[in-house]
Amino acid sequence: MQIFETLKKDHKKVLDLLEKMENSSQRASKSRHDNFLTLKKELLEHMHGEESTFYQFLLEHDDMKDLVYEALEEHRTVRLALPDVEAKDVTDEQWKPILSVIGEMIKHHINEEEKEIFKMCKNIIKREDDERLVSEFQSAKQEAQVSV
Ligand SMILES: [Fe+2]
Ligand SMILES: [Fe+2]
């Protein structure tokens, strides 16, 4: 399924950024700062893309509703947590622990999407839906126009 591959590519980008930041030292302030802004942009665009295309499509199917509403709630908590990381100076000793809490939320969410949602919806996405979802998802991400 092309839509799964498209979403997974974004997930990988996010996980790589998190790993880089989790392994960074307090002195690497410039790269911590830049990587965080990239992460924020990636996440906000990706979540907007999913919410306005992929999740909307899934919500038309009753048996997907619980999982999608749970995923939407997870998006909301990620959005709420981003400013907490941003408010902390990257050289502060609390920066990494705060980042790692949001990191755990993100990893949990990605895992649920890839392991549960994708598995459960693969039979309801027809070939033409798949192509349409990929192009709609990409345009929705661009429309989000997140500037950091
Ligand atoms: Fe996702
Ligand atoms: Fe998501």
Image: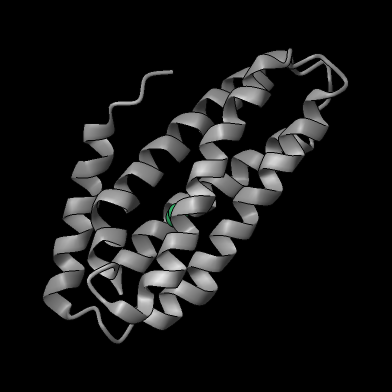
In the rendered image, which quarter contains the C terminus? Answer: top left
Q: Position of residue 22 (x, y in %)?
A: 76, 38
Residue nearest the observer in this picture, 25 or 143: 143
Q: Residue at x 36, y 38 (%)?
A: 45
- 82 above or below 93? below
Q: Residue at x 66, y 24 (%)?
A: 84
Quadrant position of ligand 1? bottom left
Q: Is residue 23 left or right of residue 84?
A: right
Q: Position of residue 11 (x, y in %)?
A: 50, 53
- 106 above or below 88? below
Residue nearest the observer in this picture, 50 or 16: 50
Q: Position of residue 39 (x, y in %)?
A: 53, 33
Q: Position of residue 35 (x, y in %)?
A: 59, 27
Q: Is residue 29 left or right of residue 111?
A: right
Q: Residue at x 72, y 34 (%)?
A: 99
- 86 above or below 82? above
Which quarter of the picture shows residue 133?
Answer: bottom left
Residue found at the very far right of the displayed protein: 93
Residue found at the very far bottom of the displayed protein: 123
In the rendered image, which quarter contains the N terminus? Answer: bottom left
Q: Is residue 93 left or right of residue 47?
A: right
